Amino acid sequence: MSFRLARLVPLGACAALAACSASGTSVAPSSFNDVQTSVTASGEHVIRIGSREIRFGGPNHRAAARRSWIVPGAAKDGRALLYGSSYDGGFINIYHEHGTNQAPIGQLTNGLVSPQGIIVDKYHQVWVANTNAFTILGFQRGATTAFTTLNDPGYFPVSIAVDGNGTVYAANAQGQSGQSGNVTYWTKGSTSPSGTLTYSNFQVVLGIGVDASNNVYVSYVPKSGPPAVVEFPAGSQTGQVLPMSNVTISDITFDKQANLVMEDGSGGLGIWAPPYSGPPSRTLSAFGNEPTLGRHEHKVWIAYANFSNPMIEGYDYITGAQIDVITSGWTQNSAIPYGVAVDPPARL
């Protein structure tokens, strides 16, 4: 991937997200304390942390083909679906989860502007962070037009989580005017924000996850120090930093044993057993965005957001063996995956 530093700016001037690998191979970040910020000639904001690059703001990315489509009956045959979002391409590809380098069976484009984090809830609804439009869109399974739009005024949402009560949470990288990042949430049925979760050391908020007890976990870049994870107990707006080590900027998910799963600071996928302290209990050699477990947790999926070699990868969750690589539907330098989700999701 080629990248031009137009100028360095204060971290507070940054505004919206897409994490990618800056090289063609999986590499460990070099230093989490070395945070660089810049603005490209197009006005897009960029944060670099080690080998990670977070991009947001600037031009609105919409799909060249503005019409959504899906193979007739493909969403009604009972087979598991896999979704992959492209910030640069402005679309979400739809695949059958099972297969080998599957071709897309559909694509969502209607209303999407620089889409990033995606998640599927227990009702088979797809939620997507519509980053540069300051909204969250919700799609029913099989539909090509959003059934609802959640407004996130003045903030750039980059990652999404949904709790067991249907409350939708968005990790906002930062505000449009450079305000520190936070988390906006909407209770079920609301389209205007129901509230926010903030923490005194938030600078850039990048990842979010909710466990089976509706506790909310947020990964962020602090005002000083390396990336960290803070927990907000269910129903609380008071966060507490977890004593985890070797963490990085990442979306967060949980398996049926309540293990916390996110990217680690060594270029792999870390799995932390409760109570989530110290280094990972085990790791998988998988490097990419938004780790997502399939329904039976046999597979874990990641989006490898690399401009030279874009793909979605599937790994055996126990052995770590790579079992699927999806390059179909992605284009070097212009349409690469940033988010991934599976329907039905884990922990239904």
Image: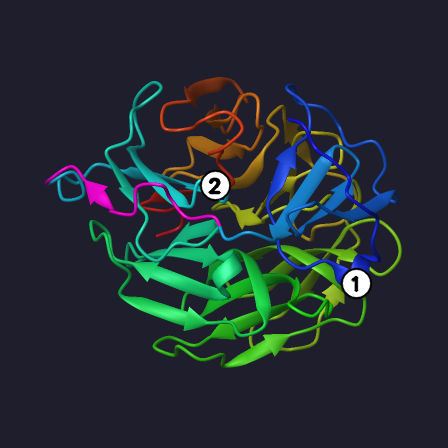
Q: Amino acid at mark 1?
A: Gly
Q: Is residue 76 above or below residue 173?
A: above
Q: Main secondary structure of the magenta part?
A: loop
Identify the residue at image location x=85%, y=61%.
Answer: 223
Q: Is residue 345 above or below residue 98?
A: below
Residue 18 percent across, percent down from the top left: 59, 45
Instruction: Look at the numbered discs 2 and 1 and tell me whether their residues touch, using CB distance below 8 Å.
Output: no
Name the residue beneath numbered marker 2: 292
Left or right relative to 88: residue 342: left
Residue 117 percent across, percent down from the top left: 50, 50
- Assess disc 1: are there few (<14), some (14-19) or many (≥20) residues with their C-alpha within 10 Å of its C-alpha: some
- Residue range in magenta is 61-72
Identify the image's colour scheme: rainbow, by chain, secondary structure or one colour.
rainbow
Q: What separation in Å lies between label 2 and label 1 (alpha carbons)?
A: 30 Å
- Assess disc 2: are there few (<14), some (14-19) or many (≥20) residues with their C-alpha within 10 Å of its C-alpha: many
Q: Is residue 3 above or below residue 180?
A: above
